[in-house]
Every structure is written in C-alpha cells, then in structure tokens.
Image (cartoon, rainbow, N blue to C red):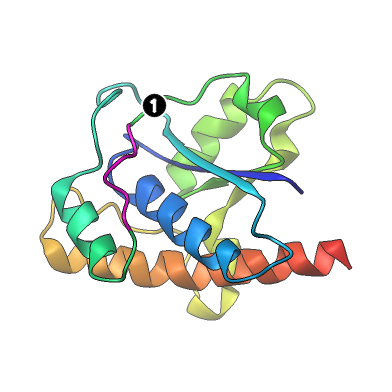
Amino acid sequence: MKSVLAVCLGNICRSPMAEGVLRQVFAERSRLAQLNVDSAGTGSWHVGNPPDGRAQAAAAARGIDISAQRARQVSTADFSRFDIIIAMDVNNLKALKSLAPKGHEKRVVLFLDFAPQLGKRDIPDPWHGDEDGFDHALDLITAAAHGLADHMEAELG
C-alpha cells in the first residue's frame, strides 16, 4: 500500500483530523513514513474551507497541525489514486461504495474496523456538538490509526 484517503461528510472535522493523526502515526513508523495520506468529503458544502476551528484546536492539543488542510470532495479519480479509502461512518461507507467505479468498491472500508476492540462502527460527527465531541472523535481516530498502521505493516511482511 502506498496511499490512504480518509473520508467523512464535509471534510472539515473527522477526516482532516484522521489525515493529521495518520500522518503522525505513519511518521513514527519508518516503514510507513513515505505513505501518501489525504482526506475528502462525500459532500461539497465546505470545499476550499479549512478544518473547523474546534477540530484544529483538538488536534493542536495533541501536537497535530491540520490548519493548512482545505476541504475537497471525493472524486472518481480517488478510487484509482488511493489504495485504501477509509470511511468515518456507515453512511459515508455506503456513499463511497455507490460512487466507486466497478471493481474498486473493495478499497473502501470502515475506519473503525481497524479498532475492533472499541466495539463501535461509527466515529460520531462532532460538528453539531461541543469541544468534547472532537476529543472523543480523536480518541477513536487514534485507535483506528494505530490499528491501520499495524495492518499495513503486516501486509508489508
């Protein structure tokens, strides 16, 4: 694997945080440090905007700077560009699978499948809540990021 795309609904909360966490986790593992990581949204409402200020603050509190990221919408080209596309929740998983060109659906997976110990499928969207929701989302994202990194290292042998 050479590339990972994190996807949520608007690409201003969960997926930018996931992109930042994945970059940090991969950088800590020399075999994964060169992997390409990006994020996108299934919707177009926030295209061109930076991540939500609360997402930026929560990530910054953990030493992760996501301020330079800008929201973009998933394109059909992403299904060829990325080896794995991780969805933040079941609704985005369904949307991605319906957008995927024939034969590329298997690249789309639920991010929390890499953290089965949590017993959850969805990373809740913190956008309508308060700062605590962003911290909770980051906790789930961090667990899944480490699980994904373990999976990818195992695939490398």
Which residue lies most toward the left here? 130
Asked which quadrant contains residue 100, the reply is top right
Is 90 left or right of 35, judged from the image as shown? left
Q: Nearer the viewer, residue 29 or 107?
A: 29
The spot of residue 44 in percent (x, y) is: 33, 21
The spot of residue 29 in percent (x, y) is: 65, 70
Q: Nearer the viewer, residue 138 or 94?
A: 138
Note whether 9 is above or below 123 in the view shown. above
Q: Nearer the viewer, residue 57 or 104?
A: 57
Residue at 68% across / 29% down in the picture? 81
Note whether 134 is above or below 108 in the view shown. below
Note whether 86 is above or below 92 in the view shown. below
Residue at 25% across / 69% down in the picture? 135
The spot of residue 113 in percent (x, y) is: 60, 63
Amino acid carrying mark 1 in the image: Arg
| Magenta-drawn segment | 65-70
Residue 137 in magenta stretch: no
Which residue lies most toward the bottom here? 117
Report which residue position mark 1 lands on.
Answer: 72
Residue at 65% across / 66% down in the picture? 149
Is 138 left or right of 152, judged from the image as shown? left
Asked which quadrant contains residue 45, the reply is top left
Q: Nearer the viewer, residue 14 or 25?
A: 25
Is 21 left or right of 64, judged from the image as shown? right
Main SS, magenta residues: loop
Q: Residues within 10 Å of mark 1 (few under 14, many from 20)?
A: many
Residue 66 in magenta stretch: yes
